[in-house]
Structures are given as C-alpha cells and as structure tokens.
Amino acid sequence: MHDRRRFPLPGAVLCTEDSRPRPARAEPGDDRWTIGWCWLYCRRADVPVIWIGPAAFNGMHAPMHACERCLSELEYLIWHRATG
C-alpha cells in the first residue's frame, strides 16, 4: 500500500507554493469563461464558469463547469491532498 503523503495524486504536478500556476480567474475578455451553472460545490446559476473537463457517471456524460470560488476550493483540496 502506498503512503499517500509521499506520492502525489496520479497526474498531479507538485510545485512549491510560490511557483504554482495561478488558478483560473474570470478576467474581462477571457473567452474561456461563460455565464452558466457551477457544477461543483456551490451549484449557483448565472455566474461566470469555466469548463474543467468531462463528467461521466453510469454511462452518462456531460461537460463540467466551475466558478472561480469553487475552483479555488478544488485547488486547495488537491494541493493539500497531494502534499499530505
């Protein structure tokens, strides 16, 4: 069994805190963002969201979008899980 504190999540890239890429932010004119429904934690509608990948469950697929606030929370969870 792997010690999860020593091994990053599959596909994760570990960076020092000061060199990590900035999380996606809803900047004016950034066409990656659209107004829609956040599929992550807050589930708010009519907020700026960005596509974060496909979601699949029980043979169904959908594009998954997240707002800036939920992306920050997801980044926090991934960072702390990967660095243990």
Image (cartoon, rainbow, N blue to C red):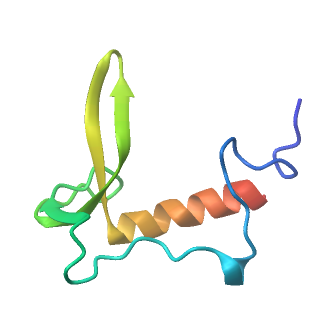
Q: Position of residue 31 (x, y in %)?
A: 21, 68
Q: Height in image: 32 above or below 81?
A: below
Q: State left or right for residue 20 relative to residue 46.
A: right
Q: Which quadrant of the rendered structure holds the N terminus?
A: top right
In this picture, residue 30 sits left or right of residue 76:
left
Q: Is residue 83 left or right of residue 40?
A: right
Q: Position of residue 30 (x, y in %)?
A: 25, 75
Q: Please report the residue visible at 68 percent of the width from the left and 80 percent of the height from the top.
A: 19
Image position, residue 69 (x, y; %): 36, 71
Horizontal side of residue 15 vs 2, given as left or right: left
Q: Quadrant of residue 16?
A: bottom right
Residue 77, above or below 24: above
Task: Write the residue at 76% across / 50% down.
Answer: 8
The C terminus is located in which quarter?
A: bottom right
Q: Position of residue 74 (x, y in %)?
A: 49, 60
Number of numbered discs on residues: 0
Say which residue appears at 47% left-offset and 65% top-offset: 73
Quadrant hosting residue 17:
bottom right
The residue at the point 65 percent across, 63 percent down is: 79
Q: Compare residues 26 and 41 and report the one nearer the observer.
A: 26
